[in-house]
Image (spheres, rainbow, N blue to C red):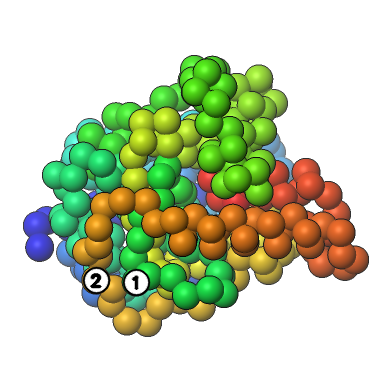
Amino acid sequence: MKSTAPIILFVYNRLSHTQQVIAALKENLLSKDSELYIYSDAAKNEAALDKVNEIRAYLPSITGFKDLHICLRDQNLGVDENVILGVTEVIHKHGKAIVLEDDLVTSPWFLKYTNDALDFYENKEEVISIHGYVFPIQRKLKEVFFLKGADCWGWATWKRGWDMFEPNGKILLDKMIARDLQKEFDFDHTAPFFKSLEDQANGKCTVWDIRWYASAFLAGKLTLYPGQSLVANIGHDATGMHCGPNTNYDVVLAQSPLSVETETVPDPEAFLAFSDFFKKLSADQTRPAKGILSRSFKKLKDTIKKLFKAI
């Protein structure tokens, strides 16, 4: 294996979540060989100050990594600008990076999977990124597979990939419309990703990851996914800025290593599996007492803003 990729962790005001993320990372085989960069956003108001300071008091105590770099923002950037600037800084320094937020708990095999894949696909120009999370899909998936686009719940990329990120949502939206790609972008109209991109372009939201997904998608680039998730999101407990309480995305983490080698083409069966999953989420909105998706389609869109921020 080549040198391990640095890990970037973005935090704000959730100490317990952050501690769980760190504890899980330290269980990874390559944690002691990995540099950890933590970007702590500043409090957006007086009410958030105590929790932000609580996080910042904890960060210097973190051990178990090759090196620890802590960046304390002196003004509130918001998650989107914080992520874009942080990823850009580390990628330009190291040429590659693994990216997490403060609600993403990893399998002990996450760092091996991402580093193995970064090494194996480094010179495969058609591959833009590596992703660690996969939906709790019932049908059997391949050990690893590719889909067109990019994702944001525990991911990794190289400088050549991140250089393709287009921050201007209006440019992305216009290209999507001109090429009539809305249907494919929305997994055959089963998920409102295009609406999220439209909202971002029109200033209704600031989400970075719908732009990351769209940038990769429009370039025809591929992202590698695991057949069983190596990342679990623990933020659907109403503590985060973008998600309410919800168990629709709960997964059982993989407890064994994955081979990252597969054919670098989109997997049509995985595309259909994702589409079916989104259909089920949309259908759940008509059922009583089923949480976030039962209340409205807008809630599905808001959750999608969190995963691509997208879901």
Estimate the x, y position of residue 130 in percent, counting from the top left: 33, 53
The first of marks 2 and 1 along the sequence is 1
The kind of residue tagged 2 is Ser
Is the residue marked by circle 2 packed among few (<14), some (14-19), or many (20+) residues within 10 Å?
A: few
Q: Which residue is drawn at 56% across and 22% down?
A: 177
Instruction: Return the x and y of residue 299 as percentages of the image width and height.
Output: 76, 49
Screen quadrant of the N terminus = bottom left
Q: Which residue is drawn at 25% across and 58% down?
A: 263
Closer to us: 2 or 39: 2
Task: Name the residue at the bottom extreme.
Answer: 255
Q: Percent x, y for residue 93?
A: 20, 37
Q: Is residue 283 left or right of residue 115?
A: right
Residue with the mark numbered 2: 259
Q: Which of 160 and 18 is in front in this view?
A: 160
Q: Residue 250 location in percent, x, y?
A: 60, 70
Mark 2: which secondary structure? loop
Pointer 2 with pointer 1, Cβ within 8 A: yes
Identify the residue at horizontal 14%, vertical 44% (top origin). 123
**How far is disc 2 from disc 1 in space, using C-alphas?**
7 Å
Instruction: Compare residues 121 and 28 and report the one nearer the observer.
Output: 121
User: Residue furthest toward the left?
Assistant: 2
Binning the other alpha carbons within 10 Å of mark 1 as few (below 14), some (14 to 19) or many (20 upward) gives: some
Q: Which dot marks residue 143?
A: 1
* Callout 1 amino acid: Glu
Can I make out residue 37 in this image? no
Q: Residue at x 34, y 65 (%)?
A: 144
| Circle 1: element type | loop
State which quadrant residue 14 falls in. bottom right
In this picture, residue 299 sits left or right of residue 206: right
